[in-house]
Image (spheres, helix red, strand yellow):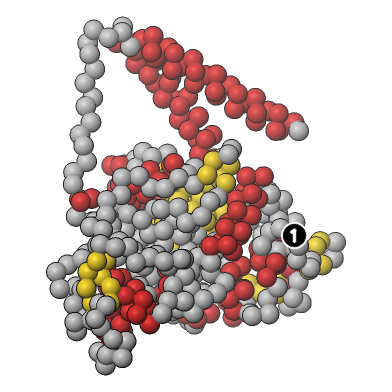
């Protein structure tokens, strides 16, 4: 009897694994950043991903909590390596081997993390970085590849380098004129050949928002997908949106250099909701819904009709990110920092976005400017500057969600962000006698006065799971029922594949 149970169990595992792979292949992908003062607990994030149909995720660094939570979740992982690690990884294959052992092998073997890619660096050839990473990115890539092979993961885990779209350009303003930047042309060809030889894809980040942000004369509709923009005609192809044109410029560059079939992943694409006049809820919903519609239809670009994997940027806002590129950098999430839904999105099959569950907050208490304080107080400006040095005040900028507040409310917003960032600690709402705490929510119109996640409450141990089963229960009928249901679903999926193949 025991042997028969084992056979049924193994067969069930094989079929369920194949079924899980079919389901995963049809899912969405996104970026999970962790640069937050009060990040969502990893287990809640993984539940948020699964509840919203995300089956692939890109991490920017080997965050232990995230990797453990992703273990055995059915979510495929692209694991990033920050640029600051490139020099050490390039210096020695031994350093790369240690990194792979600690951050790839261990999470696969101990926790069952489904790591599919290691992304070496993040936009290392960005023009603004000048030549900082030019001599280390490729050696680091080669050393990581060697380390994966040594660890026995060369077939399971592929390497890539996420690159900004500024690594290519066009000499005639049209996608067909695409080629790689002259200053890195030889390096790019060497990297692409190496990736191709080792079965790795090229990963590119494309941001239509930045085209609009950088050029006040950029045609607005050309940033979106509704086809109302005046087309850019390139021979027999008409481009009605910048994403298609940008991506096909890359494809032209690959074709010119002998890599016409090189697989490409779009590693980051999205639209922020705050921090600039063009970063708002309306535009973000318009862009991301259009993008999701294309993904769900299986729509690619004129040069690549089969769509690539596309990783939405990003899952949640990150209030500790650098704002060197602009205040919008902290507001790319389709969810707020706490996993609440910012705006409605249809994610397919009639599903809408679902908020994070089980989030615990600090007390419903805000820090605001005292009614007795005066906006002419000589200490006010200094107090606001102090608060915004240590907390995120990017929503106060011109054209942002809190940009229309009066002087007193402006101060209240700054004071509250500091108070919340400091976990509502005693003394954190004392700004030269200008502030008081209140239990009345001061949020108004589009301006939300935050209350942060209570990190202390989320450090409680997870509930234990019981594996005990009553001995007098006959589990064979249950196993047979599950096996039968699995076979039916698997058969349907196979029929769909056959129909698709012959269609």
Residue 418 placement, left or right of 251: left
| Nearer to the camera, 262 or 251 | 251
Residue on which the image places disc 1 = 227
Name the residue: 60% across, 23% down.
492
Q: Quadrant of the rendered structure where residue 146 is?
A: bottom left
Q: Position of residue 435 (x, y in %)?
A: 23, 77
**Residue 374 percent across, percent down from the top left:** 28, 86
Q: Position of residue 281 (x, y in %)?
A: 53, 62
Q: Quadrant of the N terminus?
A: top left
Say what secondary structure mark 1 lies in: loop
Toward the right, the furthest residue is 236
Q: Residue furthest left?
A: 426
Residue drawn at x 82%, y 67% is 233
The answer to whether residue 201 is seen in the rendering is: no
Residue 419, position as x, y percentages in the image = 24, 70
Q: Is residue 80 left or right of residue 97?
A: right
Q: Is residue 204 above or below residue 58?
A: below
Nearest the eye: 44 or 345: 345
Residue at the extreme front of the image, as rendered: 372
Residue 199 versus residue 302: which sits nearer the camera? 302
Image quarter hosting the C terminus: top right
Nearer to us in this view, 199 or 328: 328
User: What residue sits 48% from the left and 53% below the top?
Assistant: 30
**Count of numbered labels shown in the rendering:** 1
Residue drawn where x is 65% and y is 25% of the image = 495
Give the left or right position of residue 451, taking residue 336 as reference.
Answer: left
Q: Is residue 429 visible?
A: yes
138 up-or-down from 353: above or below? below
Neighbor class of circle 1 (other Cα within 10 Å; few <14, some 14-19, many 20+) is: few
């Amino acid at each position: 009897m025991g042997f028969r149970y084992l056979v049924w169990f193994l067969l069930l595992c094989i079929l369920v694994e194949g079924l899980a792979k079919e389901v995963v292949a049809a899912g969405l992908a996104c970026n999970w950043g962790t640069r937050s003062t009060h990040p969502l607990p990893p287990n809640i994030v993984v539940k948020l991903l699964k509840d919203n149909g995300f089956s692939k995720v890109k991490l920017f660094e080997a965050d232990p909590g995230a990797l453990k939570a992703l273990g055995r979740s059915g979510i495929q992982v692209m694991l990033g390596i920050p640029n600051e690690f490139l020099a050490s990884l390039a210096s020695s294959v031994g350093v790369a081997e240690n990194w792979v052992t600690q951050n790839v092998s261990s999470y696969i073997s101990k926790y069952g993390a489904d790591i599919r890619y290691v992304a070496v660096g993040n936009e290392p050839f960005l023009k603004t970085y000048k030549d900082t990473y030019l001599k280390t990115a490729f050696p680091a890539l080669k050393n990581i590849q060697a380390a994966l092979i040594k660890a026995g993961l060369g077939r399971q885990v592929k390497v890539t380098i996420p690159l900004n779209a500024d690594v290519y350009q066009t000499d005639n303003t049209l996608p067909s004129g695409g080629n790689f930047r002259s200053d890195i042309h030889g390096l790019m060809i060497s990297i692409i050949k190496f990736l191709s030889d080792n079965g790795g894809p090229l990963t590119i980040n494309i941001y239509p928002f930045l085209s609009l942000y950088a050029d006040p004369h950029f045609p607005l509709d050309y940033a979106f997908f509704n086809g109302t923009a005046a087309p850019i005609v390139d021979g027999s192809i008409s481009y009605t949106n910048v994403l298609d044109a940008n991506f096909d410029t890359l494809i032209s560059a690959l074709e010119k250099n002998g890599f016409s079939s090189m697989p490409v992943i779009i590693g980051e694409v999205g639209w922020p909701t705050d921090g600039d006049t063009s970063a708002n809820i309306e535009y973000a919903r318009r862009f991301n819904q259009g993008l999701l519609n294309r993904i769900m239809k299986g729509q690619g670009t004129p040069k690549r009709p089969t769509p690539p994997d596309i990783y939405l940027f990003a899952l949640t806002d990150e209030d500790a990110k650098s704002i060197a590129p602009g205040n919008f950098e902290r507001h790319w999430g389709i969810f707020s920092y706490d996993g609440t839904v910012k705006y409605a999105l249809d994610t397919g099959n009639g599903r809408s976005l679902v908020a994070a569950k089980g989030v615990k907050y600090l007390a419903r208490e805000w820090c605001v400017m005292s009614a007795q304080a005066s906006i002419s107080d000589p200490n006010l400006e200094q107090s606001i500057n102090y608060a915004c040095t240590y907390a995120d005040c990017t929503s106060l900028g011109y054209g942002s969600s809190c940009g229309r507040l009066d002087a007193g409310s402006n101060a209240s917003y700054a004071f509250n962000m500091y108070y919340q960032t400091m976990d509502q600690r005693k003394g954190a709402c004392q700004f030269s006698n200008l502030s008081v705490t209140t239990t009345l929510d001061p949020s108004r119109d589009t301006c939300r006065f935050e209350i942060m996640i209570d990190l202390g409450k989320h450090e409680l141990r997870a509930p234990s799971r019981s594996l005990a089963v009553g001995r007098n229960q006959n589990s064979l009928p249950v196993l047979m029922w599950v096996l039968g249901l699995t076979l039916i679903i698997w058969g349907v999926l196979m029929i769909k594949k056959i129909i698709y193949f012959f269609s």
